[in-house]
Image: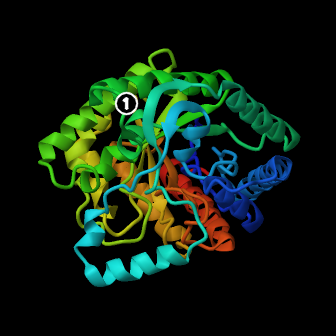
C-alpha cells in the first residue's frame, strides 16, 4: 500500500452518503421493482463524480467511489455470482435481543427506513460461479475515468469487495453438501473479483465483518471455540483467494457490525487478532472510535501486528452525528502509533462506512463530510507531532 514518508495518510472504509434520488432507485431494485436502467446508471455516474470531488475537498488521501452503485457492501454479489435465489431471515443480533425496550425502539426505526436490509439476503440454491466480470470491468473503467477527469485526486484509489466468510454467513447454503465445500466455492468465485480489481490498478479492500460480527449472530449460541474455528477457516479461504495478488495491494476491514446498539456481546479483539494477523494482507482496518472498542487499541501492543503489517485505525465514529474534534482524532492516532511501535505503521480512517446498505446511514451527509474533514485535520496534527511534519 502506497504511503507518504513523514505523514499519516487518511482513508475510510468505503461506503459514503448516497443522494436521496439514487438511494430510492437502489432500494426499488433491491425489492425487485422495475427501475429504468439508463436513469439508474446516470444517477450512479453523477454520484460517483460528486463523491470523488467531495473526498478530495475533505482531504482524503486513499479514496474510492463511495460504493455509490451498490445497494449494500455485500449484496452486490447477487448481480455478479450465479447460484443465488429466494431469501431468508438472518438470526437477530444477540446484543439487541437482550434489551427488549431497545429492541422495540430499534425495530421501529428500521421499519421507518426506506432502505435495503442486510438481514434478508438470498440463499445459495445452485452452484456458485462468477458471472459478472464484464460488469465489474466496466465499473473499474468508469471509476478510472472519473479519477482521470479529476486529476488523480488520491495518493492511491481503493476498491471494495466482500469476503468469502461474509457471504458464507449471510447467504445461507441450500445447495452444497458441506459447509466447507460452500466456503471453498465462494473463495474460488471471489478470487476472480479480487484479481480483476487489482489488475485494474486499485488497492483492494476486502470487507470481512464476519470475522468479528458473526460471533453474536451466526455463532451466538455456540462456544467461542466454534467461532474461532470459523475465523481460521475464513482467513485460510481468503488467503487462497488472494494467493496471486501481492499482499501490499490488499487491506482487510474487520468490524463488529455498523449499527448503533449495545454491542456488549461483541467478541473481544484479543480473541481474534492473532488469527486476523494470519491474513495475507498489508493492513488491517479496525474500529477504535466507538465506545465499545476504543480501549482495544491496547491489544495492538499486547499482540503486535505481523511483520510488515500495518493498521488503518478507525478514529471517526460513523454512527454518531457528533463531529470529532481534530485534537481528539490526533490523540487517537497517536495512541495507535505508540501501541504498534511507530507512526509509519499507521493510517487514519473511519470505524466503518457511512451507508453500508442504501438508506441505513445514521449520519447526515453534510455531517459525514465534516467528520472526514476533521479526520484530515486530526491526521495533520498527529503528523506534526509524530514526524515533525506540517
Residue in the picture at 67% in, 53% down: 29
Q: Is residue 310 left or right of residue 130?
A: left
Name the residue nearer the viewer: 135 or 47.
Answer: 135
For residue 295, above or below residue 109: above
From where the camera sits, is residue 4 visible? no
Name the residue nearer the viewer: 129 or 339.
Answer: 129
For residue 15, above or below residue 303: below
Image quarter for residue 361? bottom right
Q: Is residue 293 left or right of residue 118?
A: left
Residue where numbered disc 1 is placed: 175
From where the camera sits, is residue 222 visible? yes
Q: Is residue 238 left or right of residue 7?
A: left
Instruction: Classify 10 Å Cα crowding around label 1: few (below 14), some (14-19), many (20 and above).
Output: some
Residue in the picture at 64% in, 60% down: 27
Q: How many marks?
A: 1
For residue 374, above or below residue 161: below
Q: Is residue 11 left or right of residue 50?
A: left
- Residue 284 position in % (x across, y down): 41, 40
Residue in the picture at 51% in, 52% down: 348
- Residue 249 position in % (x across, y down): 54, 27
Name the residue nearer the viewer: 170 or 372.
Answer: 170
Residue in the picture at 39% in, 66% down: 290
Amino acid at each position: 500500500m502506497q504511503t507518504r514518508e513523514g505523514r499519516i495518510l487518511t482513508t475510510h472504509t468505503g461506503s459514503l452518503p448516497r443522494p436521496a434520488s439514487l438511494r430510492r432507485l437502489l432500494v426499488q431494485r433491491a425489492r425487485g421493482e422495475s427501475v429504468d436502467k439508463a436513469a439508474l446508471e446516470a444517477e450512479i455516474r453523477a454520484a460517483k463524480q460528486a463523491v470523488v470531488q467531495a473526498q478530495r475537498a475533505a482531504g482524503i488521501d486513499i479514496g474510492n467511489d463511495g460504493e455509490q452503485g451498490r445497494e449494500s457492501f455485500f449484496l452486490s454479489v447477487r448481480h455478479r455470482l450465479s447460484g443465488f435465489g429466494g431469501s431468508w431471515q438472518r438470526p437477530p443480533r444477540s446484543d439487541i435481543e437482550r434489551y427488549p425496550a431497545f429492541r422495540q425502539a430499534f425495530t421501529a426505526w428500521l421499519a421507518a427506513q426506506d432502505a435495503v436490509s442486510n438481514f434478508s439476503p438470498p440463499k445459495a440454491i445452485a452452484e456458485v460461479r462468477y458471472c459478472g466480470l464484464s460488469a465489474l470491468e466496466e465499473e473499474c473503467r468508469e471509476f478510472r475515468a472519473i479519477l482521470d477527469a479529476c486529476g488523480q485526486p488520491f495518493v492511491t484509489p481503493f476498491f471494495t469487495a466482500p469476503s468469502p466468510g461474509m457471504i458464507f454467513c449471510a447467504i445461507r447454503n441450500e445447495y452444497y453438501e458441506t459447509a466447507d465445500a460452500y466456503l471453498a466455492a465462494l473463495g474460488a468465485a471471489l478470487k476472480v473479483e479480487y484479481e480483476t480489481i487489482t489488475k485494474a490498478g486499485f488497492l483492494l479492500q476486502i470487507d470481512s465483518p464476519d470475522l468479528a460480527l458473526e460471533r453474536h449472530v451466526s455463532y451466538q449460541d455456540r462456544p467461542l471455540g466454534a467461532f474461532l474455528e470459523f475465523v481460521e477457516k475464513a482467513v485460510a479461504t481468503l488467503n487462497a483467494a488472494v494467493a496471486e495478488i501481492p499482499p501490499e495491494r490488499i487491506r482487510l476491514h474487520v468490524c463488529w457490525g455498523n449499527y448503533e446498539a449495545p454491542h456488549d456481546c461483541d467478541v473481544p479483539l484479543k480473541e481474534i487478532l492473532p488469527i486476523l494477523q494470519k491474513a495475507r494482507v498489508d493492513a488491517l482496518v479496525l474500529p477504535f472510535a466507538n465506545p465499545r472498542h476504543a480501549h482495544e487499541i491496547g491489544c495492538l501492543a499486547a499482540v503486535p501486528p505481523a511483520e510488515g503489517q500495518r493498521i488503518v485505525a478507525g478514529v471517526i465514529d460513523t454512527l454518531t452525528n457528533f463531529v470529532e474534534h481534530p485534537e481528539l482524532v490526533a490523540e487517537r492516532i497517536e495512541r495507535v502509533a505508540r501501541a504498534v511501535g511507530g507512526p509509519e505503521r499507521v493510517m487514519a480512517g473511519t470505524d466503518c462506512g457511512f451507508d453500508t446498505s442504501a438508506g441505513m446511514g445514521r449520519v447526515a451527509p453534510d455531517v459525514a463530510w465534516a467528520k472526514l474533514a476533521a479526520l484530515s485535520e486530526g491526521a495533520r496534527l498527529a503528523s506534526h507531532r509524530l514526524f515533525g511534519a506540517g
